[in-house]
Image: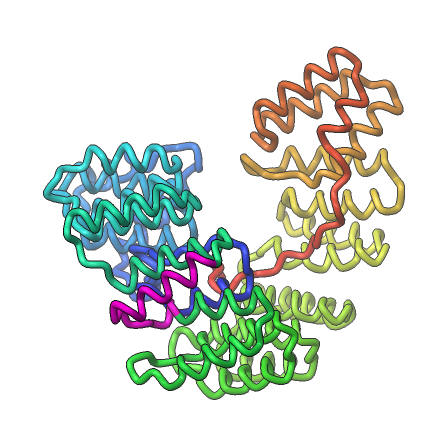
Amino acid sequence: MMRHSHFISLVKNVGNPVSLYSTASTKCHRDLWQGSLNRLYDRITASSYKASVVPILDRWLQDGQTLDKHGLLTIIKELRHYKNYTRALEVVMWMNEKWSVGTSDVVIQLDLIAKVHGIEQAENYFNNTPKQLKVPAAYNALLNCYCLAKQLEKAEATIQRMRDLGFSRTSWSYNCLLNLYYKTENHEKFDSLLGEMEEKGIPFDSFTYGIRLGAAAAASDLEEIDKIMTEWESNPSVYLDWSNYAAAASGYTKAGDVDKALAMLKICEEKIPISKRQREAYEHLMTQYAVLGKKDDTLRLWKCYKEQMKIYNKGYLCIMSSLLKFDDIESVEKMFEEWESEHLTYDIRIPNILIGAYTRNGLLEKAEAIISRIILKDVKPNSKTWSILAKGYLHQGQIEKTLELATKAVIAAPPRWMPDKGMVAACLECFKRKDDLEGAEEFIKLLGDKNSIPLNVHERLLSHIKNENWTALLWEFPKGDDEETSEFMPVESKQ
């Protein structure tokens, strides 16, 4: 089932891709799982990212452990929730080899193939799917793949194919295409499709209203936002929960009407659920109050949050990121001390927030002290840690130190980590000043080994080095704009 809360990010992050379709968008809470299922999940997630999970699943059965399709689907949902798509796909493929494949299994595998291997392989999988399984749900999944990839012509062709096959169009398929028109700024088609929905009596649901709200917010059209909210609230078939009003608050914020945004947040507070989503609501509202510059309300929500439930890493990430919007380093330091006293699972993102605050304010000694503190706890700083510190030294003009730390960042980085362009350009400038072609080559190869730069760029850089073409080399990595180095947690991240 699709979740209305996904539209918070739609309105808050206009321009970012948002999935309107997920076969497993509702998170399964592991505290409700059976013990054996927890153990299997732990084995899967503890394995190396390069290793296949197939031997783990085979060994599980060989050891006499029970496993059924329902249990595997539960694990797949959890993996998808944390965007562990590669492992989820491996589990799906293994499952589909062991049990008969139904339409829902095709939908899940198609979506995961697109996420892991790209749209072309997803198309191949769909084309090779048996005809009897190519029901509307399968076509909808393919449509969603095209929409997320912003392939407008193929998305429209899929809609036409569904029409030719006599499949009735639902609110979902309209919403999917409507969202694509919104993302690609096809305003005429967007308006035309809305008109078609009204003409054909296709009911607007919360997704439809959410997309319309996002479009109105992007255009800073306060009158249209008011109109949408009036329609939405007066539609008896659509229930508005806290997340819908949070989306409206984001819309008003983007359009510049702070008073109406605050009014929406007050309604949000009244609608905070007494359920597992209560935590999510508090965390999101704290960040929205911070965006609006309301420090007292941010701290008030934090106090309520702590009174209502135990605080985990995600809560500290939210409040620390929020307080940084007020440049309140002292309060962030106190939150960091409080977090350490709770002895939760050590999450490197939390000290990274404080390190980022220090470096942006030129407090490099304090930043170094936090890193030393991390290392004393037998925790390894990650690529973000070193990159944040490298940028701090770069701003101080200490290029040699920047090069040292940037190298550490690349070594610690996961595959496909994207380095800061300004930092890389500074490192190459340092190699140029020392006339160190060999060092530059090693640095570029290191980036290439991590797949941090495209293969064609990697090859061009190495060619420039061999030809001692420093001008072209530096041009490949123009200095970028300063980027925010503190990590801002999305609503649905792992605790």
Where residue 171 sits in the image (x, y, percent)? 28, 64
Where residue 329 sits in the image (x, y, percent)? 77, 67
Q: Is 278 included in the stretch rendered in magenta?
A: no
Residue at 62%, 77% in the rendered image: 289
Residue 479 position by quadrant: top right
Where residue 350 sits in the image (x, y, percent)? 63, 59
Residue at 63%, 37% in the rendered image: 412
- Asked if 24 appears above or below 106 in the picture, the reply is below
| Left/right of residue 91 with respect to residue 400 in the rendered view | left
Colour mode of the rendering: rainbow
Q: Is 192 included in the stretch rendered in magenta?
A: yes
- Asked if 467 appears above or below 240 in the picture, the reply is above
What range of the chain is rendered magenta? Answer: 188-208
Residue 469 seen in render: yes
Residue 306 position by quadrant: bottom right
- Asked if 384 appears above or below 126 in the picture, the reply is below
Residue 328 position by quadrant: bottom right
Magenta portion: prevailing SS class:
helix
Residue 313 seen in render: no
| Left/right of residue 227 with respect to residue 44 in the rendered view | right
- 153 or 205, nearer to the observer: 153
Where residue 246 sits in the image (x, y, percent)? 50, 75
